[in-house]
């Protein structure tokens, strides 16, 4: 799950974003047919028939712990799957239409060449605290997020001032042109919340959102970690056949999640391995969903300490990965990457597909003092526990490196433990997923590759002033000169991937989901990885 990216919290140059989102073990992928739901009876967590929607519980089976941070200002990890149903932003990105659409704002306009933005707020919206939403409340929420300057707060970096013109009008004045309607659709740091309750959120006993669901129970470390219930005062209203209860049942092993889905004890498994996904497509009572994503796998090399500090070792490791074999083994669950930016985003580069070259890898290792007749090279690697795709990468790479007299000591870890070790520079190779906070490539460069004194997601520990300067220029360039921005992204990827050899990006995930066949209304939105918008669903019958 950001796991990736994103999906946790930090400052970024004053703003370094975090995401276990983007980051920890990914749970999904996808592109192809989605069978129509069949008729029949599904059961919720308690095994009760889902025919009466008010009694049905939609059960989501993540493979990682759900909540790392309850504060909507700093949240930057796996909890996106819950927070996106509890909190809302001014806009939401429509992946099918490829544009932001109304959420808490019903309309908006821009002026002064993209440096002024005015949003009209939806009327009749209440926070879960009972307080009404107005422009002053929205202003306070965004300003608090900017002040805390954690997680993805960098998304508001262009904002100079925010003004509550009247109760329903919010005006932004920017330092430089930026697509604020797109920024406002971010899966992180764009939430509007009741700041008066912000200090009461950390224990997960309450929340301060406007979304359709509110917290019911949170039991950290328990199998059913989190349950949500319908917020009766939701501005969108409720129909009898909608799911009013949601449970997140943490299931680290994919095979176990698949068994629970077949039994009707869970309704949604965000990721299956290729074999199980193929089986799901022909299993009665199950439907599948497949869609291209903006989420890629990153293998980050320790540029600061240990053997990988030598660029020759890092280049050898890049060349040792069997990219074609890995993608073939994924059987549709991923496509070969070309550079760091997935296709469909500004900054994607054609012709940067990596290739395995063991002869050249051996030459580089020999030059670094390692090899068949030289010293054995021992490297440590951490990756996401329960992620079969990352495990496949580890298996293939370990086997290949053995032939080069390199021993890879790979350890699967729960995301929080892996991330804590990474922040201490505790491994030579760090494997994680990344995806953008909003549909823009900037997130990869700012969060993962900009210099950071205290690493958050810069887990290659790269420090390069020239690269930092180019990263800082990206937002305004993207807003004013798309061609120049595209070239800047291409140049940065060559510096980071080829010259610095700080990372290998083997593949971009294809999201593959499995759901109960009785669930109706599910649509995958790659802009919000692993998120199910439960309010849009209903059980058949």
Image (cartoon, helix red, strand yellow):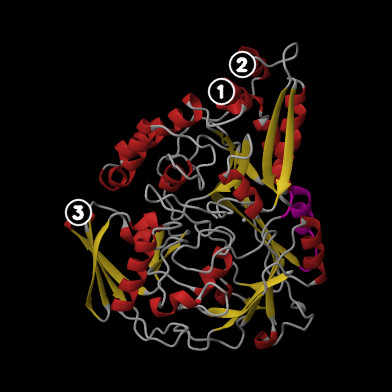
Marks 1 and 2 close (CB-CB < 8 Å): yes
Sequence-first disc among 2 and 3: 3
Residue 282 seen in render: yes
* Residue at point 61%, 29% (across, down): 306
Residue identifier under label 3: 113
Left or right: where does residue 349 sit relative to residue 360?
left
| Depth check, front residue: 473 or 148 | 148
The magenta region covers 272-285
The N terminus sits in image quarter: bottom right
- Which of label 2 and label 3 is nearer to you? 2
> Is 398 drawn above or below residue 471 in the view shown?
above
Residue identifier under label 1: 310
Residue 368, label in figure: 2
| Depth check, front residue: 256 or 224 | 224
Magenta stretch: residue 278 in it?
Answer: yes
Magenta stretch: residue 152 in it?
Answer: no
Marks 1 and 3 close (CB-CB < 8 Å): no
Sequence-first disc among 1 and 3: 3
* Residue at point 42%, 40% (across, down): 450
Report the number of numbered marks: 3
Whole-percent x, y for residue 251 in the image: 74, 62
Left or right: where does residue 532 sit relative to residue 372?
left
Q: CA distance from mark 1 to mark 3?
A: 46 Å
Element at badge 3?
helix
Element at badge 1?
loop
Whole-percent x, y for residue 320 in the image: 66, 25
Sequence-first disc among 1 and 2: 1
């Amino acid at each position: 799950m950001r796991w990736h990216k994103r999906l946790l919290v930090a400052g970024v140059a004053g703003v370094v974003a975090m995401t276990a989102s983007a980051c920890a073990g990914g749970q999904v992928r996808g592109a192809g047919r989605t069978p129509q739901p069949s008729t029949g009876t599904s059961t919720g967590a308690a095994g009760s028939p889902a025919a009466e929607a008010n009694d049905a519980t939609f059960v989501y089976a993540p493979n990682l712990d759900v909540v790392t941070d309850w504060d909507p200002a700093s949240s930057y990890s796996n909890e996106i799957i819950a927070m996106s149903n509890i909190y809302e932003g001014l806009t939401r990105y429509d992946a099918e239409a490829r544009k932001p659409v109304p959420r808490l704002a019903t309309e908006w306009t821009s002026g002064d060449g993209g440096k002024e933005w005015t949003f009209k707020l939806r009327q009749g919206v209440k926070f879960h605290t009972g307080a009404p939403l107005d422009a002053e409340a929205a202003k306070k929420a965004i300003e608090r997020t900017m002040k805390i300057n954690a997680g993805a707060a960098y998304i508001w970096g262009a904002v100079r001032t925010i003004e509550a013109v009247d109760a329903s009008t919010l005006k932004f004045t920017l330092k430089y042109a930026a697509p604020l309607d797109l920024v406002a659709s971010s899966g992180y740091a764009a939430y509007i919340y009741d700041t008066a309750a912000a200090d009461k959120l950390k224990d997960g006993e309450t929340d301060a959102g406007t979304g359709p669901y509110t917290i019911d129970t949170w039991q950290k470390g328990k199998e059913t970690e989190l349950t949500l219930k319908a917020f009766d005062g939701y501005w969108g209203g409720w129909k009898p056949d909608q799911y009013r209860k949601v449970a997140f049942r943490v299931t680290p092993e994919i095979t176990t999640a698949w068994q629970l889905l077949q039994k009707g004890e869970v309704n949604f498994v965000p990721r299956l391995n290729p074999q199980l996904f193929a089986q799901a497509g022909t299993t009665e009572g199950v439907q599948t969903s497949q869609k291209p994503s903006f989420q890629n796998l990153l293998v980050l090399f320790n540029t600061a300490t240990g053997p990988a500090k030598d660029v020759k070792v890092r280049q050898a490791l890049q060349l040792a990965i069997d990219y074609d074999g890995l993608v073939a083994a994924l059987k549709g669950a991923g496509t070969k990457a070309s550079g760091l930016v997935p296709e469909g985003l500004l900054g994607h580069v054609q012709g940067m597909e990596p290739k395995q070259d063991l002869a050249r890898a051996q030459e580089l290792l020999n030059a670094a003092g390692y090899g068949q007749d030289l010293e054995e090279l021992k490297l440590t690697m951490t990756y996401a526990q329960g992620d079969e795709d990352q495990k496949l990468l580890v298996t293939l790479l370990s086997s290949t490196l053995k032939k080069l007299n390199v021993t890879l000591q790979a350890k699967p870890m729960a995301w929080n433990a892996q991330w804590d070790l990474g922040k201490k520079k505790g491994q030579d190779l760090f494997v994680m997923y990344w995806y953008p906070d909003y549909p823009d490539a900037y997130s990869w460069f700012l969060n993962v590759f900009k210099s950071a004194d205290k690493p958050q997601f810069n887990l290659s520990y790269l420090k390069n002033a020239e690269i930092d300067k180019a990263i800082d220029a990206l937002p305004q360039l993207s807003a004013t000169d798309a061609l120049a921005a595209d070239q800047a992204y291409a140049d940065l990827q060559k510096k980071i991937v080829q010259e610095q050899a700080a990372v290998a990006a083997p593949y971009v995930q294809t999201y593959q989901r499995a759901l109960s066949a009785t669930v109706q209304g599910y649509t995958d939105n790659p802009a919000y990885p692993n998120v199910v918008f439960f309010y849009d669903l209903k059980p058949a019958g």
